[in-house]
Amino acid sequence: MTSRFSEVTTGPPIEVFALNKAFLDDTNPNKVNLGVGAYRTDDCKPWVLPVVRKTEQAMANNEALNHEYLPVLGLDPFSTAATRMLLGKDNKAIAEGRAFGIQTLSGTGSLRMAAEFLGRILKYKTFYYSVPTWENHHLIFVSAGFTEPKTYRYWKAETRGLDLDGMLEDLRNAPENSVIILHSCAHNPTGVDPTPDQWKQIADVVQEKKLFPLFDCAYQGFASGDLEKDAFAIRYFVERGFELVGCQSFAKNFGLYNERAGNLTVVVNETKVVAPSKSQLTLLVRGMYSNPPNHGASVVSTVLNTPELYEEWKGCIKTMADRIISMRQGLRERLEKLGTPGTWEHITNQIGMFSYTGLNQKHVETLVNEYHIYLLKSGRINMCGLTSKNIDYVANAIFETVSKVGLDSSL
Amino acid sequence: MSCALLFVITMMCMNFFRSWWSQVEMGPPDAILGVTEAFKKDTNPKKINLGVGAYRDDNGKPFVLPSVLKAEEQMRAKKLDHEYGPIGGTAEFCKHSITLALGDSNEHVANGLNSTVQGISGTGALRIGGAFLQKFFPGNKTVYLPTPSWGNHTPIFKHSGLDVKQYRYYDPKTCGFDFQGALQDIAKIPEKSVILLHACAHNPTGVDPKPEQWAEISKVIKDKQLFPFFDMAYQGFASGDVSKDAAAVRLFLKDGHQIALAQSFAKNMGLYGERAGAFSLITSSKDDADRTLSQLKIIIRPMYSNPPVHGARIVSEILGDANLKSIWLKDVKEMAERIISMRTMLRDNLAKEGSSRNWQHITDQIGMFCFTGMNPAQVEQLTSKYSVYLTKDGRISIAGVTSQNVGYLAHAMHQVTK
C-alpha cells in the first residue's frame, strides 16, 4: 500500500542524544559520559534533591491536592516566586507592577513562548545568537516565525574566553528591534561569562541600537552557587530601564529535568501593557498546549514559598555548584601537572556545567573511540560527568590524546 | 545647551521609556474560563457551574481516581528520578497509549506501523499533529472541522499554519446529528484534505454518529481520499467501555485508512493538570513509522524539548499493571455511569416540572457535554436569575450536575424555556 508520507525523510539525529545512546550501548568498564547536561553526584548518579523528595512526599500526603487543570498561565504562586527569585525580592520593577511571570514548559518552553510573543505579536523578525550557543536556540526562534537568524561573535578560540570586541561590533550592526539572546550566566556551551564591566558595555550597545534583550536563565544558582550573584546581568539590565524577558528553567537548579518546570519573566515599562500582553500570551499558550503541567511547578512553588525549604534548597544548589567547581580545579591541576600541551586555566575561568575545552574534532574522536570518553564534537564537556573516581583517567586520556594528536591553533 | 537640542534629547528619552508593547491589543477573553470566573464571584448558595469540562463527583468535588492514587503510591515506592526523558515520551507510555486506543494484540502496533509520541495532553497532541501536517502533508493543508467543534481546534490548527474549514454536523432542529448534511459536505471537500473527527462524545454537542453512520462516513472519506485525524479525548468516559468508545477509530483502520490520532488522559484518568496525551500516525509500513517518528521529534524539540513525565508515568503504571488497569476500568465506568444517570435524572425532572419541550436529546447525547438547545437569551436568564453558569451556546457540562442540584437545574431550565 502506498503512503501519503512516503516522501518524508528521516530527520537528522540530535548529536547530544545520539552521543548519550552510544555511551549507554558501550560496554567498556572505563567509559565516561561527558555529554548530556544533567547533574551527577560523585558516584556518577542522578541526584533527586532531598528537599524535592521531601516536598513530593508531603504533596502526596496532602489530601487537599488533586490533578485539576492549572490556569492557562500556570500556577500563580509559582510564577510570582520564580520572578522574584530572578529579579530580587526588592526589585523596583516588581514593586511597580511592571514585572510578571507565566509558567512555561521548562526553559525550552519559556524560550518558545517568548519567541512566539516577540515574533507573532510584536512582529519582530530578526534574532541574534552567540557563536556558539545551545543548539536548540536557532530552531526555537525559526519555528516561532522569525525569518532573520543572525549570529554574534562570542567564543574566542585563541584565549578560550570572550570575544568582546567581536560581540560588540556584531551587535552594533544589528538592526533595531533585533532580539538578542543573551545567556544570563554559565554560558552554554562555553562556560564563558562576561564580567560585570563587560555586561555594562554590552548594555550600552543594546541601548544605543534599540535591541531587545532576551536572557536565557537556565542555571541561576547553579553557576556560582549563589542565586543573587548568578542574576547580576539581568538585574543590571532591569535597573538600567530595559524592557526584557528572562526565560527560566528549573531543570538543573531543582534537578526536575523531566517535570518541565519553567517561567517566563517579562519586564515592561508601562503597567498598562501588562494585561494585554498576558491576554496575548494566554492565546498563544491555549493554542499550543492549553495549560502547563502541575507537578514540577507545585514542587518548586512549595519550596520557594516555604522559608525552611527555601534555605534547604539553597544548600542543595551550593552542593552541586561546589562539586562542579572542585572538578574544574581538579581537572586543571592534573592537566597542568601532567604537562599537557597548551594552557588550561580556562577550565577554572569558565563557570557552570559546561566547559569548552578547546579540544578539536580529532581529539574528540580519539577520546571517544580509544578511551570511551564521550563528549561533543565541539569539545564541550559536562563537568558533572567527572568524579573523584574518574578524574585521573580523564586527565590522563586528554594528556595522552593531545600529546599524540598534537595541538592546533585552538589550544 | 540649545533648546532644540534639549528638546531632541527629551524626545529620545521619552521614546526610550515608551514601551515596546504599547501596540499590543487586548486579546478576546476566553468564553469558557469567563464562565468559571463569573461563577466564583456569585454568592448565591444555589449556584451551579456547568461550564468547564472537568468531571465532578456527586458532591460536586474533583475526583482523584482510586486507580490513580494507587498508581502514585506504587510509583513512590520505586523512588524514580527526574532525569530527562526521551523527546517523544517513554516507549512504554507510547505503547500503552496506542494499545489502549487500538486494542490489545492489534496488528498495527504488533507490526510497528504506528509512530506515537507523548503530547502535552490532547491539546499538545493536536498541535504536534497540526505542525507535522503543515510540514509534511502532501495533500491540501486544510483541516475540516465539524460544526460546531471544540473552540480550541481552530486556534490550534491555525497556529500550526493550516487552514481551517467546516462541514455540517449538528442539527439544531433535532439537537442531533445532521447525517445527510455531514455526508453532503464531506463529499464536497477537496480531495486529499484533512478531516477532523471526534472519536466519541463529541465536544461540545454530545452528539455521536451511530455505528452504521460511521461506516458510511468512512466510505465517503475513503472515496474522497481525505485524511482522517481523530480527536479522542473521552475514551472510556463516554459509554464506560473503552472498546466501544474506540469503535470508530478501529473501524476506520479496518476499512484501510491511514489515520492520525490525538489522545488525552485528562478526563478518563482525571489527570487534567498533569498533561498526559499522545499523538499517533498509523502508517502503512514500519519504515514510514520510523521516518515520521524522527520528524515528530524534530517538531517537539523546539517547542519544549521533552514532555512532563509525572502524568505519563501514572498512565504507564496503570495500563502496565493488570490489577491497576482493572481498577481503572471500573473507575472510568463509574464516572461514565454517573454522567449517564444525571442525564436521565435531568430529563425526568424536566418532565416532572411539566415541560412540554422535547428533551430526548439529553439522554441521546453522550459524554461530558450536552447541547441543550437553549438560545443565548435563555442562557442569559438562566445565569442572571438562577445562578446557573453555562456557555452561551447552550452547552452544559453534565459533570457539574449532581443528585442534589438536578432538581433545581430542571426547575430553572423549565422556567426559562416554557
Image (spheres, coloured by chain):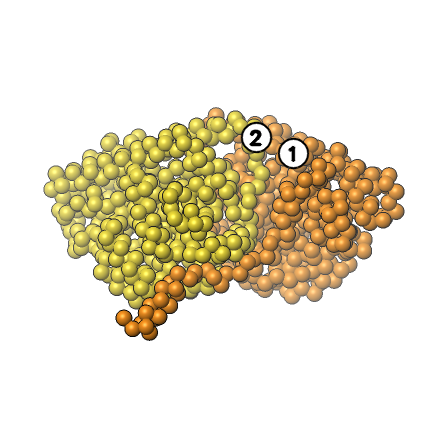
Chain colours: A yellow, B orange
- Between B288 and A322, the one nearer to me in the picture: A322
**Any part of residue B260 in sight:** yes
In the rendered structure, the answer to whether residue B3 lies left or right of residue B292 reads: left
Give the secondary structure at mark 2. Answer: loop
Res B184 quadrant in image: bottom right
Q: Residues within 10 Å of mark 1 (few under 14, many from 20)?
A: few
So how many labels did they put on this image?
Answer: 2
Q: Nearer the viewer, residue B8 or B388?
A: B8
Question: What is the chain letter for disc 1?
Answer: B
Q: Position of residue B246 (x, y in %)?
A: 66, 44
Q: Which residue is mark 1?
A: B61
Residue type for callout 2? Ala
Q: Is residue B330 left or right of residue A386?
A: right
Q: Position of residue B405 (x, y in %)?
A: 75, 36
Q: Quadrant of residue A27?
A: top left
User: Relative to A179, does residue A374 appear above or below in the rendering?
Assistant: above
**Residue at position x 34%, y 43% from top?**
A220
The relative height of residue A62 versus residue A204 in the rendered view (above or below) is above
Quarter of the picture holding the N terminus of chain B: bottom left
- Identify the residue at horizontal 30%, vertical 34% (top origin): A318
At label 1, which amino acid type do we have?
Lys
Q: CA distance from mark 2 to mark 1?
A: 11 Å
Counting from the top left corner in percent of width and height, residue B375 is at 76, 54
Instruction: Please give the chain letter of the residue carrying mark 2.
Output: A
Q: Tag 2: Cα neighbours inside 10 Å, few (<14), some, or many (≥20)? A: few
The residue shown at (40%, 50%) is: A93
Q: Position of residue A270 (x, y in %)?
A: 45, 56
- Element carrying mark 1: loop
Q: Residue at x 15, y 50 (%)?
A: A406
Residue beneath label 2, please? A64
